[in-house]
Image (spheres, rainbow, N blue to C red):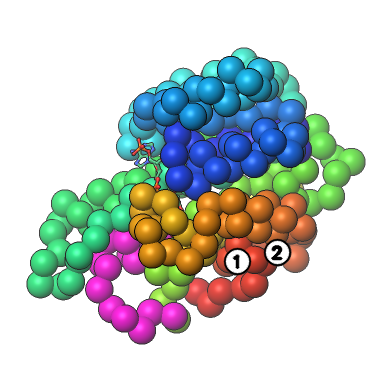
Amino acid sequence: MKSVLITGANRGLGLGMVKYLTKHNKAETIFATCRKESEELKQLSHENKNLHILNLDVANTGNYGEISSQISGVVGSIGLNLLINNAGISTKFTKLNLVKTEQLLDNLTINTIAPIMLTKTLLPLLKQAAEANKDQPFGVRRAAVINMSSILGSIAQNDQGGFYPYRCSKAALNAATKSMSIDLKKDQILVASMHPGWVRTDMGGKNAPLDVDTSIAGIFATVERLGEADTGRFLQYDGSELPW
Ligand code: NDP
């Protein structure tokens, strides 16, 4: 890939993606966005001159234009190949009798509205990449958007209830993935929802069965294989399909 942008790249899965891409030399240019850079991310940017850290609170949609200009300044007219909408939040302990309006709004803002609005803002750059990489097959080497979803956003697999803010925000993100995949197919841009597995991060907690490296290696092995038939699918890190 020529260029990749990852939101929420200072810790957890986002940081894991940056580490993976730099270690395996998978992208010529990497944009890691975060609210506050971590020591680890800063260290990686010192070691890898192709890693650009951009300051972005995804809740501030008004700043997206500035991010787009900064990316353009680096990639020029060849655009952005891959956008990974990774930044996310999860409100815990949200049974129906306890759920608060604010929690629902916060989860929707970060997990649903931000990925939609950022994709909208960066669409001209994704289109440029699709055009500039005409010799490449439909997929991440041309242009793609991966929305980090969750199995908790699956309506079909919900047999536990609860988690209103998170479940609703990820189910809505899945709906957005489907619409984007249809709307952007003519522009040769692939769009898919990805469940990373249950992973040991701040969000996943200590009891999660997967470590970050296993999840991330699976995600990229899967993402690199995706073609035209895969746009609009809901997949998990190991490539298996999940029900909406
Ligand atoms: P973490 O809680 O470990 O990290 C979340 C990341 O999102 C951090 O970088 C955080 O930055 C960032 N973020 C949150 N709010 C904002 C904001 N307003 N602006 C910019 N960045 C923000 O979570 P994970 O790494 O585990 O999760 C990554 C993605 O994977 C999420 O979308 C999550 O829903 C999804 N996922 C994770 C699973 C798991 O088991 N871990 C399972 C299923 C899905 P900051 O440090 O500034 O808060």
The kind of residue tagged 2 is Asp
Q: Is mark 1 within 8 Å of ligand 1?
A: no
Horizontally, residue 118 falls left or right of residue 162, namely right
Q: Is residue 21 above or below residue 240?
A: above
Q: CA distance from mark 2 to mark 1?
A: 9 Å
Q: In the image, what residue occupies the spot 31% across and 81% down?
A: 160
Q: In the image, what residue occupies the spot 20% across and 66% down?
A: 94
Q: Nearer the viewer, residue 222 or 103?
A: 222
Q: In the image, what residue occupies the spot 50% across and 74% down?
A: 244
- Where is mark 1, residue-wise? 235
Horizontally, residue 27 falls left or right of residue 31, namely right
Residue 123 visible, this orientation: no
Residue 216 drawn at (x, y percent): 60, 52
Residue 21 visible, this orientation: yes
Q: Residues within 10 Å of mark 1 (few under 14, many from 20)?
A: many
Q: Is residue 49 above or below residue 224?
A: above
Residue 16 drawn at (x, y percent): 55, 43
Residue 230's label in the rendered image is 2
Q: Residues within 10 Å of mark 2 (few under 14, many from 20)?
A: some
Extent of the magenta region: 157-174
Q: Quadrant of residue 34?
A: top left
Q: In the image, what residue occupies the spot 60% across and 62% down?
A: 237
| CB contact under 8 Å: marks 2 and 1 | yes
